[in-house]
């Protein structure tokens, strides 16, 4: 009986390991770089395939640099430009560069013309805030996303270029402790707000 249970568990594990990636690959095989996959307030999120996929530069009709299609930076800058009518004075830089480590919590980030908050701030994150994530060994550029919705103990983000198998939406726990707010994700440096 013990052998049968072990064989059944191993069989289920092998089938699961095969089926889940195969099913994802089938779904993703129908997507091409540049296909719309989501939107927030009418601003579209596009599929980019692998995170390292690099396309051409996207410029607005008035020549403002939105970034490289369809990277994470391009989405957040396009979102701020289209939905919030905001142009950043410094329209270049990698995702991690959006957060200026030298600034105090709640002060002006002049390069982005936004107020910057650290991930342990007296200011609660808000919808439309731009989240900045640190670099990793696999991604030296960092990542950025937008807070799509928020409640007392959770945020939902929307993002572009989370990877070939990543989702455009994710949820993180929001914690209020000792008078400070923080998002339970060690990579999040903080948020920027118009």
Image (cartoon, rainbow, N blue to C red):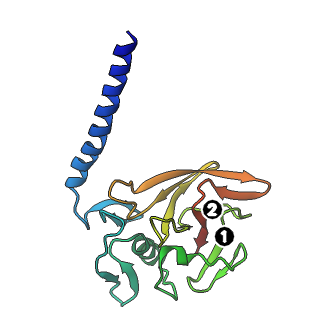
Residue 18 in the figure: left or right of residue 67:
left
Q: Residue at x 56, y 82 (%)?
A: 112
Residue 125 image label: 2
- Callout 1 touching callout 2 (CB < 8 Å): yes
Instruction: Find residue 42 and report its horizontal and vertical position in percent.
Output: 37, 65
Tell us which disc is closer to us: 1 or 2: 1
Secondary structure beneath dot 1 equals: strand
- The answer to whether residue 21 is above or below residue 146 is above
Question: Which residue is more in the foreground, 178 or 185?
Answer: 185
Q: Residue furthest left?
A: 30
Q: Residue at x 61, y 86 (%)?
A: 110
Secondary structure beneath dot 2 equals: loop
Residue 30 in the figure: left or right of residue 42:
left
Q: Residue at x 43, y 62 (%)?
A: 159
Residue 93 in the figure: left or right of residue 32:
right
Residue 117 image label: 1
Q: In the rendered image, which quarter is residue 31 located in? A: bottom left
Q: Residue furthest front?
A: 3
Question: Which residue is more in the foreground, 155 or 5?
Answer: 5
Instruction: Find residue 66 and report its horizontal and vertical position in percent.
Output: 39, 81
Instruction: Find residue 9 and report its horizontal and vertical position in percent.
Output: 37, 24
First in sequence, mark 1 or 2: give its number.
1
């Amino acid at each position: 009986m013990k052998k049968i249970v072990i064989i059944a568990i191993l069989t289920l594990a092998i089938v699961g390991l095969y089926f889940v990636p195969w099913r994802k690959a089938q779904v993703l095989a129908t997507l091409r770089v540049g296909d719309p996959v989501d939107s927030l307030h009418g601003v579209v999120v596009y599929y980019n395939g692998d995170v390292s996929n690099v396309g051409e530069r996207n410029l607005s009709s008035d020549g403002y640099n939105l970034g490289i299609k369809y990277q994470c930076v391009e989405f957040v800058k396009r979102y701020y430009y289209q939905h919030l009518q905001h142009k950043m004075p410094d329209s270049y830089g990698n995702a991690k560069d959006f957060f200026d480590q030298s600034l105090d919590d709640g002060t002006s980030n002049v390069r982005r013309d936004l107020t910057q908050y650290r991930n342990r701030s007296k200011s609660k994150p808000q919808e439309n805030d731009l989240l900045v994530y640190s670099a990793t060994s696999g991604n030296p550029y960092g990542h950025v996303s937008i807070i799509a919705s928020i409640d007392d103990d959770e945020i939902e983000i929307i993002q572009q270029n989370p990877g070939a198998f990543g989702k455009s939406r994710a949820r993180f726990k929001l914690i209020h402790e000792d008078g400070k707010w923080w998002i339970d994700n060690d990579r999040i440096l903080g948020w920027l707000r118009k």
